[in-house]
Amino acid sequence: MKLVLVANPRAGAGRAPAAAERACVRLRSAGFEVAVRSTESAGHARAMAKGGDFADAVPVAVGGDGTLHELVDGLLGRDDGVPTVAVFPCGAGNSLARDLGLAGVDDAVARLVAGAERSIDVARVRVDGRTLHALNLVGWGAVARINRRAERMRWARGLRYTLASVVELLRPRLRDSGARVDGARDGRELLGALCISAHVGNGIPLAPAARLDDGELDLVRIHRAFRPRLAWLLAAAYRGAHVGSPLVSIRRVSSLRLDLDPGEWINVDGENRPARAVEVEVRPAALRVLA
């Protein structure tokens, strides 16, 4: 089997390229034909995948959720059937890797060598006419605001999502999500997220019951409340203990439409973009993962 390890130099505080080289040694000794390519900028992994750079090789994302998202979005954008990828987790969040039970790069390499494989769902996301694909989540309201802030706090490494969430809670005025969900607006909604994976951010099990292959999306919505209650909810979410709170609603859907206020943003697997009209639908078993 031919593999192309796509390493993101920014992922994992710069650890990804070295992790890729170490993985190469083990993979080549196991009989794989391996090459390493580094991404040069945001969007480079997507461009490689969409441009057919991998041909008869399986791309391996050596980085975080963003690197994997770009690869998968590019592959599915080609509409060549069900693509195959692998992931060597080396980022800040590694949400999909957590759901796959991967303990790290060494574990991911061992599973690939052993021939482990499974099919998982993907969400097709149409944002103002452009089609994207998500493996982790589609978030709006405070989800998008927190993620945008966290991108400016990379100096905090693994704490950046937590710090960004705290800053959001300390805003002088808590805004609602700015969204209509399937045509209905709930002015109490602080944030919403459609989850494919159970984990988001840096390990928060936002949708603990979500499964990668159940053919559904978990819709999580959190209402505004007094800040002490929201602070408690944030802490509880790291343990999955937010489920059952009257501030939280979770239900399963196969599709959803969002209409966002002017100036609002959407978060698709950690990528933030301004959006007005968003349509999301699940694509069951649309991706094969070597893990």
Image (cartoon, rainbow, N blue to C red):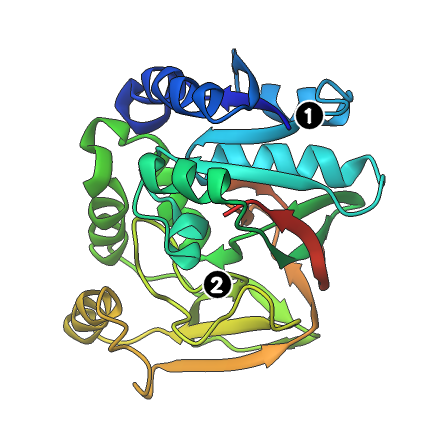
Question: x and y percent of residue 9 in the render?
Answer: 39, 16
Q: Is residue 180 visible?
A: yes
Question: x and y percent of residue 280 in the render?
Answer: 70, 61
Circle 1 crowding by C-alpha within 10 Å: few under 14, some 14–19, many from 20: some
Lateral position of residue 60 relative to residue 51, left or right: left
Q: Which numbered disc, 1 or 2, marks the residue that appears first in the sequence?
A: 1
Residue at the spot of label 2: 177
What residue sits 32% from the left and 35% below the top?
106
Residue mark closest to the camera, 1 vs 2: 1
- 102 up-or-down from 197: above or below: above
Lateral position of residue 15 relative to residue 9, left or right: left
The amino acid pointed to by label 1 is: Ala
- Give the CA separation, mark 1 to mark 2: 42 Å
Observer-nearest of 102 and 167: 102
Observer-nearest of 86 and 153: 86
Q: Name the residue furthest right.
A: 80
Circle 2 crowding by C-alpha within 10 Å: few under 14, some 14–19, many from 20: many
Question: x and y percent of residue 5 in the render?
Answer: 52, 22
Q: Is residue 277 visible?
A: no
Which element type, helix, strand or loop, lies under badge 1? loop
Residue at the spot of label 1: 57
